[in-house]
Amino acid sequence: MITAAQMRAARALLGIDQKKLAELSGVSLPTIQRMEASEGNVRGMVDTLTKVVEALNEAGVELIGENARSEGAGRGARLRRAGPASTPANAAP
């Protein structure tokens, strides 16, 4: 599974736009746009999801599933828990 947020974050790490991801994966631009606009896990044809994940992997992004370990080396970022983006981490509740 891949989430829409993971797709957007992966593109940001690579510095590519949706059009470039569409080209790399062989998936249409409207499909990429629809996938990234979804809430939570991206839904779609397994073949399409596989193409996008493989393209991101080949470009150098390791997608890490919930509670999964990273087997790669190098720096990375992981969201520990989802929360409001506008709330600072050190703000009082």
Image: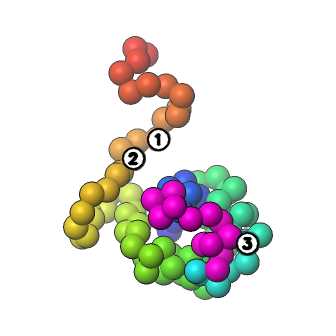
Name the image colouring: rainbow
Q: Secondary structure at mark 1?
A: loop
Outermost top residue:
92
Q: Give the mark, 3 or 1, whose residue is nearer the N terminus.
A: 3
Judge left or right: residue 57 versus residue 42: left
Q: Amino acid at mark 2?
A: Leu
- Dividing the picture into quadrants, the one containing residue 80 is top left
Q: Which residue is mark 1?
A: 82
Judge left or right: residue 30 versus residue 68: right
Q: Which residue is mark 2?
A: 79
> In the rendering, which numbered label is found on residue 17?
none
Q: Give the mark, 2 or 3, whose residue is nearer the N terminus.
A: 3
Q: Which residue is mark 3?
A: 29
Give the class, few, some or many, for how many residues have Cα within 10 Å of label 2's Cα (few <14, many ≥20). Answer: few
Give the class, few, some or many, for how many residues have Cα within 10 Å of label 3's Cα (few <14, many ≥20). Answer: some
- Percent of width and height locating residue 46: 60, 81
Disc 1/disc 2 C-alpha distance (Å): 7 Å
- Give the extent of the magenta segment: 12-23
- Dividing the picture into quadrants, the one containing residue 65 is bottom left
